Amino acid sequence: MSSRRIPNRYGFSLLSWVRFLVLAGAVLPACRAGAPRKPAAPVPEARMVFSLQSEDTGTGDTITTREVWSLPGVGQDLRSITVTYAKMGKARTAFQCNNASSFEVRVVYQLQARLDDDGAWRITGEQKRYTPGACDGDIPSFLGVRLHVMGPKVPGRQYLALEQSGKTRLLWAHTPAGSWVWRRVTPVEQDEQKIEYEVWDLEMNADGTIGGTCDRMEIRRSTSDQTFACSRRSDIVLFTRYRLVGRFWPNGQIELRETGFTTQNRHPCDRSEKRYLDTYTGVLMGDGIHLKTRGDDAEQVLTRRHGL
């Protein structure tokens, strides 16, 4: 940290400055004479990170593509950009490229950009680092891509617009902070249908820890003329709020744990206020958080909620 020069604009004499420095030295921690000063630790540069995930199941196999873009922070020069590109395949039987049921491609790009007249940044240089493999396919090039950082200048609320070949793609902030939704409708069974709806509100702390809540609504609806005995109505609506804590890592890995819950008071169809508190592990990428509970292979995908 550079020292700041103090101008003598208050009319102090040289003797006054000497007395001030002597008094200041008396209250500061003593230093060894001649001991070298330790340089100030450099402040790490804040980065803006955006991500995108897409899936292709058109061939019957599942091809998942991920991009993570790391840019200098708000107000920084965007000439240096890092992109991590990954493509993962899962086959019903085996891929012809490697005669295996899965494959993974990972490429790290170092990009250089210049500022266009309209304020967009255009990619003009590209270097790729990866190990070539039989299932690489078409490794994308980002040369010529124009990008705009858009949205309010608030951490976690901006998004990245990429223009390439006449098309625009949006990448969202790579953070679990915000509001997420999940919905599932169970097919009709025994004259009854169940609808589940959840809203997850998560907050990120500076140390990577997470706090928040999950509001869960469960609706049981009669599909016949019968009513439920507990409520004497044709539907039941149950509500539970779960308290959450967890942790998030820059590679997208996320862990969440329910620590408690609250239910509506004395609902006639809620025979027990006890709830099973669960633990989740998963990954955040783009517009979704993919979660699994312990001992369960089923995946729950939370979708980012934009606006109201």
Image (tube, helix red, strand yellow):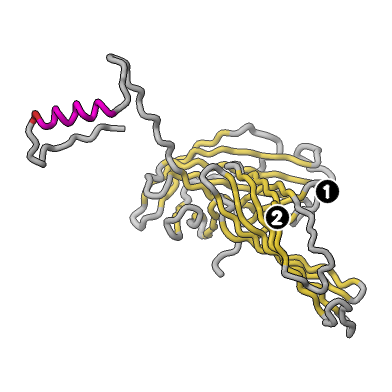
**Is residue 244 placed above or below 188 in the rendered structure?**
above
Q: Quadrant of residue 128?
A: top right
| Side (left or right) of 211 relative to 134 | left
Name the secondary structure under disc 2.
strand
Location of residue 241 in the rendering, given as x and y in whole percent from the top left corner: 69, 62
Say if the magenta span includes residue 274: no
Say if the magenta span includes residue 18: yes
Task: Give the amino acid at mark 2.
Answer: Gly
Location of residue 207 in the rendering, given as x and y in whole percent from the top left corner: 54, 42
Location of residue 17 in the rendering, given as x and y in whole percent from the top left corner: 13, 31
Q: Residues within 10 Å of mark 2 (few under 14, many from 20)?
A: some
Q: Residue 31 versus residue 219: which sits nearer the camera?
A: 31
Looking at the image, is mark 1 or mark 2 earlier in the sequence?
1
| Side (left or right) of 37 relative to 254 | left
**Mark closer to the observer (1, 2):** 2
| Residue that sits furthest to the right in the current view | 190
Q: Residue 287 versus residue 164: which sits nearer the camera?
A: 287
Picture residue at 64% right of the left edge, 55% below the top: 288
| Side (left or right) of 48 relative to 35 | right
Q: Quadrant of residue 31?
A: top left
Q: Which residues are magenta?
A: 16-27
Picture residue at 90% right of the left edge, 83% below the top: 226
Residue marked by disc 1: 92
Quadrant where the N terminus is found in the figure = top left
Residue marked by disc 2: 260
Q: Residue 51 versus residue 167: which sits nearer the camera?
A: 51
Task: Give the amino acid at mark 1.
Answer: Arg
